Amino acid sequence: MAGLVTLNAVPVGSSALVTKISAAGMTRRRLLDLGLVPGTRVEVVRRSLLGDPVAYNIRGALVALRKEQSSQVVVSNGE
Amino acid sequence: MSAVSGTYHPPVLRNQPILALAGNPNTGKSTLFNALTGLRQHTGNWPGKTVLQARGSLVHDGRKYIVVDLPGTYSPLANSAEEEVARDFICFAKPDVTVVVVDATCLERNLSLVLQVMEITEKVVVCVNLIDEARRRGIRIDIRRLSQKLGLPVVATAARTGEGLGQLLDEAVGVIRGTLKPKPNRTIYHKKIEEAVSSLEPEVRACLNGELDSRWVALRLLEGDASIVEFLKRLSSEAMHPLESTVIGYQRCVDSLMKQANKLSGHGQNEVRDSIVQTIYEAAERIARGVISREVEQKTDWDRKIDNILTSPVWGFPIMFGLLAGVFWITLTGANYPSAVLADGLFRVEARLTDLFTALNAPEWLHGFLVLGVYRCAAWVVAVMLPPMAIFFPLFTLLEDAGYLPRVAFNLDGFFKRAGAHGKQALTMSMGFGCNAAGVLSCRIIESPRERLIATLTNVFVPCNGRFPALIALATIFAGGAVTISLSGIVATLTVSGLVVFGIAVTLFASWLLSRTLLQGIPSSFVLELPPYRRPQVGQVIVRSLLDRTIFVLGRAVIIAAPAGGLIWVLANTAVGDVTILSVLAGQLDPLGRNMGLDGFILLAFILGLPANEIVLPVLIMSYLSGSALTEPGSIASLRQLLVEQQGWTWLTALCTMLFMLCHWPCGTALYTIRREQNSWRWTLLAALIPAAVGVLVCLSVNYAVRGLGLV
């Protein structure tokens, strides 16, 4: 079942498709510039030692986001 | 002359053509820059993540070209300080050719920057770098096809081996000379956006007077890019329109353009932006798919395996500490012998100089000032500083080169977040290990002013290269005295590593305190890229770190140490009544010093060392020696003799000196940089007072605690 969640809720080891970015302003631009445009597949690679930030595989690059940012990326969960 | 803006000041003289290097971070751009310019570069900044561009020159077919290395960026819009520098350079300084460096192993991601840069200028050459790495991973790229799809010259290179560099230069020079004219296939956007662009563009063109690409400006206006409006207004007020009437006309023009753009995109500027970015990424994906072929299915992902260990919840911190300790251990065991040899040689020279002065019948004061003051202080700086620096810098650069620092930032970010600080502060802190002034400068990468200030004010809590050698020397002397010889290296190593960890803890605590008192607010957004690991280029690292760091830092230290040595000789040899000025000053400071576990001479050395921390220990030695019978100090061993036997230092004195070395005011250069960056005397003063207060408090408590417990 595919449901809409935010990226921070996706467990390590699974992946999701970006549906939209709910952030505004500069954060929005940052996230878009990373290639987080709708339709992009994002893989959750690892959590850091203290649980946050989390590293994601976005278009072949490994990028770490804090929860404040990843919670503004809406994704459709499930394969 | 072209119009200037923001942080970048373009060259005034344009008699030589300019080749600019742009690209995403971690594409090997700096390696390419080094390979192209060799040693013909004058970089005032440090290699690594600074927001300044490095500049050098190269000679090709008998003509000289200026090469500018722009900061690594993901997009040519002004979302961050790095991007602003890169964009302003491409737009205003108008390089004769812009080489966009892309990573062959991650082409799709990198192509989006190429697609955006070629909207600003046609004079673009694409350099597909790290082609050797791609080959190793079984990735094949059809260069000719890529060139056709982009409409740009494309060259595959491996900057570290020099592969393809000749061809790259040929193409770049071709573009500069106009014999090669790129015809970029520009990205076509959604129909509605294209319609709006075509209705806006003619007026934009009339306004711009050929200064910038009108299509690019029209697109930026439509997506409501606030910085582009700034940009246009700035253009109007500068060199391009010298007549007042034109300026007014121009501003009116910009205003009307904005109104039109707003009407066209309505309230949907966000949608316009989203659609543009999405189209660019789709185009990048399509192009990449058409030119990349994978020979074999992906082999073992080594990066992930290494990350599993280096950022593991169990091993992450122990490995971080272990690597730090390893670097220190190699430095201090390796530096011992050369230090002794150097000291021996330099003081033999001093004896010869004395002979010379005697033979010439020079007056006593001249010999004292020049030889016992100026020369001796400079010699001490070289003997104490050079060997540890020559070992420490290359080792640290190797870790940096391999891609370990971003992992450190990743591991530590949780702490920084809890301290209310920006995630990039872990990186600016790492820069501080090189030089606090460079660390302060690198704080520009933090966009939020509040968090930038926190990072700036706390940068001094990590010891810079000027302070490491002194810490290492003191640790070696005292840890060595405390235990048997075989263990002394290990104890000294653990002491220095412990101090660094303490410094990081103080950084976090001070950041936490600041973000709850003077600088309240919430952490702003943070993105950290973890680039693939790369095998460091050992040879180049050694050469570069010796040239850029060791020689630079040492040179600065000697320049400051020489007059300081002269000053100390004067202070030590000018008497008021029957005591020297030096003793009077040290006597004044002695009560405070004693309470802090130090003495008056040590505090005085820290004060005289304000211009550069490198000279604190040499100045201290000089002032001790001025009232002592020991006139020929040499190695670590004689330093131990001086401090322990003649001045009565205990391990507590050494510990407090090291702690104060870690926490006191930043050096003159760092303070000057803070003043310039923050443009405020108040914050500059606080940047000196906060660490000084921390240092005094720490030393007082340690001294009283240790004495109270009867440990000394």
Image (cartoon, coloured by chain):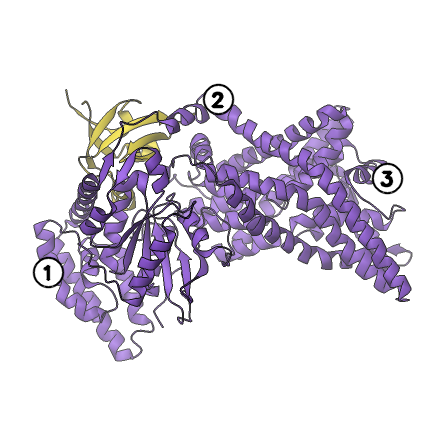
Residue drawn 81% across and 50% down? B347
Q: Position of residue B622 (x, y in %)?
A: 79, 50
Q: Identify the amino acid type marked 2.
A: Trp
Q: Quadrant of residue B97?
A: bottom left
Residue drawn 71% across and 41% down? B338
Q: Nearer the viewer, mark 2 or mark 3?
A: 2
Q: Position of residue B258 (x, y in %)?
A: 18, 61
Mark 2: few, some, or many residues within 10 Å (few <14, many ≥20)?
Answer: few
Name the residue nearer the viewer: B522 or B625.
Answer: B625
Residue drawn 84% across and 56% down? B352
Sequence-wise first label, 2 or 1: 1
Residue wearing tag 2: B315
Q: Quadrant of residue B422?
A: top left
Sequence-wise first label, 3 or 1: 1
Q: Is residue B495 left or right of residue B167?
A: right
Q: Identify the amino acid type marked 1.
A: Ser
**Labels 2 and 3 touching (C-beta < 8 A):** no
